Image (cartoon, helix red, strand yellow):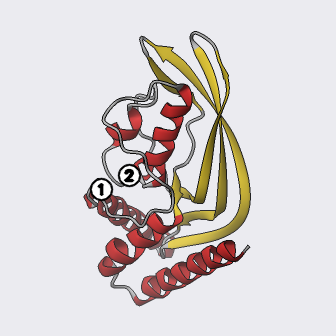
Amino acid sequence: MKKKNRIVMFALTFLIIALLQVLVSPTYSICAEQKRKTSEAYPTTPEGVVEAFCNEDFIGTGAGIGDWAKIQQYTIWSDAPGWDESILVVTFNVTKIRENSNTAEVKVEYKIIGRLYSDEIGPIFEKAKTDEVIIYKLLKKGSQWKIKSPQLHPHVGVKTKIKLLKEVIMPQVKDPRKIKRLKQVLLDIEDELAKNKSN
């Protein structure tokens, strides 16, 4: 019976978090950790497409905050996976590696402080300070470059995730155990971010 109750609590927690993320406006106000280039025109270069994709991912679009179509437009992916984990990113840097008439490769270097996932009580922050290098492969579809692979867990800006946890998730949590966990996770993330800034 206890196992069944835990499964039900986990499912309910996940659904509440997912619902709250969907309710956050796509114009979610965020302290700028990464300069976000806003342009109405679709990027014309492979690195421009990857940078636009990474900017949307950074503000949480890939994690369900906002409109999936904003991030999907830069890819050939037909669906949005139901990710239950986010990689917490401080910064990223985009560099073109190779381009020919129909394919391209673009390198993204992410500065990561950890990952965030949940169990039946709530979010869990796992410290993992590292530099991650991802090579995005692109195809040219008509006149536009589109990301083919890889399709990764959302790489969300740390301040974006902190703001979401404080302003959207925290006010909805009533269970004292979950509140305690959420407060500790916030402290851990903020502490790791502060350490990262001092290095």
| Residue 188 on image: x %, y % | 60, 80
Residue 111 x, y percent position in the rendering: 66, 57
Residue 171, which numbered label?
Answer: none
64 and 156: which is toward the camera: 156
Q: Secondary structure at mark 1?
A: helix
Answer with the quarter of the image where residue 78 lies. Answer: top left
Rendered-image quadrant of the C terminus: bottom right
The image shows residue 195 at horizontal and vertical percentages of: 68, 77
Would you say 8 lies left or right of 99 here?
A: left
Labels 1 and 2 touching (C-beta < 8 A) = yes
Quarter of the image for residue 149 reads top right
Query: In this rendering, does residue 82 appear at all?
Result: no
- For the point 55% across and 48% down, which residue is it? 153
What type is the residue that disc 1 sits on? Val
Tell me the quarter of the picture where residue 135 sits.
Answer: top right
- In the picture, the disc for residue 22 is 1
Disc 2, SS: loop
Considering only vertical position in the picture, is 144 above or below 112?
above
Q: What label does residue 64 carry, if any?
A: 2
